[in-house]
Amino acid sequence: MTAEVVGGVDVAPPTVASRGRTARLRELAPFLPAGLLLGVLFFVPLAVMFIFSLWTTNANLDIVPTWNLDNYAQFFQTGAYVRTLAKTVAMGAAVTTICLLFSLAVAYFLARYISRRWARVALLVIIVPFWSSYLLRVYSWQAILGEKGALNQVLLSLGLISEPSRLFVYNDIGTFIVLTYVYLPFAILVLYASLERFDYTQLTAAQDLGASPSRAFRYILLPQIRPGLITAAIFVFIPILGEFLTPSMVGGASGLLIANLIQTFFKNALVPQGAALGLLIVAFVTVLLIIFRKYLRVEDVYARG
Amino acid sequence: MAKNVDPLETMPVSRYAGLTRWGLRLIFAFLMLFLYLPIVFMVAFSFDASQTPSFPIQGPTLHWYDVMINNRQLLSAVGNTISVSLIVAVLATIIGTMAAFVLVRGRLRYPNGVRIAFTMPIMVPGVLIGISLLIFFSRAVHANLSLMTVIAGQLVVTVPFVVLIVASRLQSFDRKLEWAAADLGASPRRTLRHVVLPLIAPAILAGALICITLSIDEFVITWFTVGNQLTLPTYIYTKIKFGVTPEVNAVATVMLVATLLIFGIASVVLGRGRRRLPGRRRRAAIPPA
């Protein structure tokens, strides 16, 4: 530190420990356990999976080291696989859209119409269901959406339908409803964090200048909460790419998604094929993470409630 | 109109303001129904006499709680789940907090790359982490699958949460407080113990609680990395495949109440700690870096 830049308390005191290689090693040492964990138990297994994806299986389902990209090529040449992938992306997009719309309304309501204290209580109430078993909550949906389920009984007694409908579960609609249920709270938390920071006098100012309320909302509010909308979209869309429990429980045979396909490969001992498809998804997710790196505010999603 | 009325308050109100308000209220009510319906059913079926958690409702009973208490397999699964989650939470909190300090304050070469690397296990689907770990354990290092491999697998997804949450708190930490402590003669260790750690404690605790809740309910990675032992979620899964009996609902109800109690106690303790710390309000006024 030179004498000219003395800025009172704003200048960090010089430290002795920041010089030399051993000092640097000591500085980085606390990082080692986490770094090793991530390396050995996350990146190395993915690398091992990549090696397997280059190999192949023979007629006896033994794994033969062949070193080529055939498994990847085969995936894109099989119409059924590509369709499942397209359906998964479409499902992700649909659930993300409905989650954003629904949570925008809820978060706006909490941020604008409710006192901050009660909004926090409401957020807590929104998260509480997530402290109980995911499996059982999804299982409960079968009791609600099924042929003898609560929804059918309500609709029957209201006279809206004349016989129990099988439309709600064991198909894409069932998967859609339950995935929305699972991911909605994350979107609400993120959007509330954005809407809570917004200065609402801006809307009044816009209307004072002649904008209609909807115009003010569209051109003043929405652009400013864009980062929140993007964060929410990421935290809903990406996990859906790997959802296999919900589709397998409420999706029936027609509602299965790409992760169910991966699981089927492994169940049938087609490790190289499953590994190739798995890595395609990892690559896709990684690209999304790098593109949207500015919006990955994990702490906004998980540490606010 | 009185002179001292805030001009903002005299803005003309949209014709649709009342409609919007009621619409939003309706949406919120629908949300509550949507979120709590499955929970209500889950809890209700644990008190219902019918043999499977489904309609029609047969009548109230505590029978399933009795069955639960005498189900050895279920209880050992709960025991496994609790011990795994405690070990995971303690290890992940320590490992993650240490790494967060280096991430924020150390001169890592590619801090943004490291941040993305730590976000990956959170965002990469659990099914892929589970499968890659299974291949790694069974075909590469030939480890026996057990609760140890479950703990290892769960650490992969919990440590990043602690790292990112504690790092975000450290980022907004006012370092002048540390310099002041050093200026007053405190050793770095003493500063860490008495100044830094108490101030970031809420973030560390939040991280630990997230680890516990994630671990207790973790199914996918556990399913692929567990040997012949059972945890509560894997037990429930095998039950779902062969038909759930409501004692599983009874366990889930007990666990929900237990989690609520833990969080309640934690927030009371945290709230008390907050009140004991003077200057909190002032700190909050400093915007995060």
Image (cartoon, coloured by chain):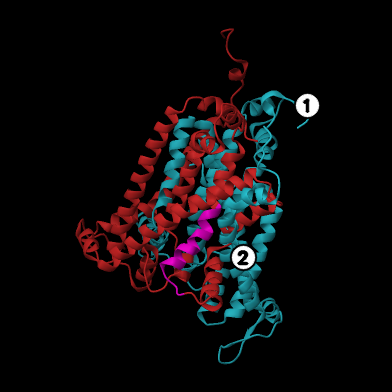
Chain colours: A cyan, B red
> Which kind of residue does numbered mark 1 sit on?
Ala
Foreground mark, 1 or 2? Answer: 1
In-front residue for pair A57/B80: B80
Q: Which numbered disc, 1 or 2, marks the residue that appears first in the sequence?
A: 1
**Left or right of B227, for residue A262:** right
Quarter of the figure that contains the C terminus of chain B? top right
Determine whether B100 is above or below B287 in the image: below
- Residue A278 in percent (x, y) is at 61, 71
- The answer to whether residue B150 is magenta is yes
* Residue B128 picture quarter: bottom right
Q: Residue at x 56, y 53 (%)?
A: B160
For the residues bearing labels 1 and 2, Cβ distance under 8 angstroms = no
Amino acid type assigned to the residue bearing label 2 in the image = Phe
Provide the residue span drawn in magenta: B144-160
Q: Is residue B145 left or right of residue B102?
A: left
Q: Characterize the magenta stretch by its predominant secondary structure.
A: helix
Residue A34 pos. (x, y %): 56, 56
Q: Is residue B218 left or right of residue A100?
A: left
Considering every residue shown, the one lying at the far bottom of the view is A59
Q: Which mark is residue A3?
A: 1
Note whether B278 is above or below B227 in the view shown. Answer: above
Closer to the camera in the image, A43 or A297 = A43
Q: Give the quadrant of residue A54.
A: bottom right
The residue carrying mark 2 is: A43
Q: Provide the secondary structure element on which disc 2 rests.
A: helix
